[in-house]
């Protein structure tokens, strides 16, 4: 059935539930897993705040912070996979919007299923922040399993 499962996570409690579901499914299907976290590009407000703070090397500082954050998110996933006996690579995609990074990685890694959480935003929050899960479901060329 599925041979390579992409598991998207942002490190949140809800995303961790999707991680467990994805790894459990990978184990049951004897499938390979890849865990992904995506770091969004800098926005104008962040750049303005950094310029205002007069940081010496804002790009290097930003790169260090996002690398550390990605490691904090992906390391526990790799540990869970190891405990379950599931082969699981980890990928940090930088400077992409989450839906784009997830879909592109699914294609480049030849994944045949994406597992991710839906944060269940409604109303104004959904309008302003958007739903990355909805974008992935809409744009993905491979099946998507949404965990609530």
Image (tube, rainbow, N blue to C red):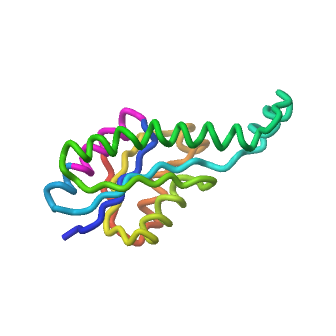
Determine the residue positioned at 55% across, 47% down.
130
Q: Quadrant of the C terminus?
A: top left
Q: Is residue 115 left or right of residue 134?
A: left
Closest to the observer, 31 or 10: 31
Where, by quadrant of the figure, is residue 96 drawn?
bottom right
Task: Establish if 108 lies above or below 22.
Answer: below
Q: Which residues are magenta?
A: 12-23
Image coordinates of residue 31 in percent, x first then y, are 22, 63
**Residue 117's x, y, as percent?**
37, 46
Q: Residue at x 59, y 41 (%)?
A: 66
User: Is 63 or 127 nearer to us in this picture?
Assistant: 63
Residue farthest to the top, as pictured: 53
Q: Residue 8: horizontal and vertical position, in percent? A: 40, 51
Q: Quadrant of the N terminus?
A: bottom left
Is residue 25 positioned above or below 120 on the image?
A: below
- Looking at the image, the residue that sits furthest to the left is 28
Dominant secondary structure of the residues highlighted in magenta in the image: helix
Residue 49 falls left or right of residue 125: right
68 part of magenta stretch: no
Q: Residue 34 sits in which quadrant?
A: bottom left
Q: Residue at x 54, y 37 (%)?
A: 68
Q: Is residue 71 left or right of residue 77?
A: right
* Residue 3: percent from left, percent from top: 24, 68
> In the image, what residue occupies the spot 79% across and 34% down?
50
Where 61 sits versus 113, above or below? above
């Amino acid at each position: 059935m599925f041979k390579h499962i992409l598991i998207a996570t942002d490190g949140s409690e809800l995303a961790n539930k999707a991680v467990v579901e994805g790894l459990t499914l990978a184990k049951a299907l004897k499938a390979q897993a890849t865990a992904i976290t995506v770091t969004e590009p800098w926005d104008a407000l962040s750049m303005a705040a950094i310029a205002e703070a007069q940081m010496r090397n804002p790009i290097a500082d930003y790169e260090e912070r996002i690398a550390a954050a990605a490691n904090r998110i992906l390391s526990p996933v790799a540990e869970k996979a190891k405990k379950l006996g599931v082969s699981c690579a980890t990928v940090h995609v930088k400077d992409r919007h989450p839906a784009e990074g997830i879909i592109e990685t699914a294609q480049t890694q030849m994944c045949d299923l994406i597992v991710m959480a839906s944060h269940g935003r409604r109303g104004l929050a959904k309008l302003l922040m958007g739903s990355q899960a909805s974008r992935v479901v809409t744009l993905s060329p491979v099946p998507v399993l949404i965990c609530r």
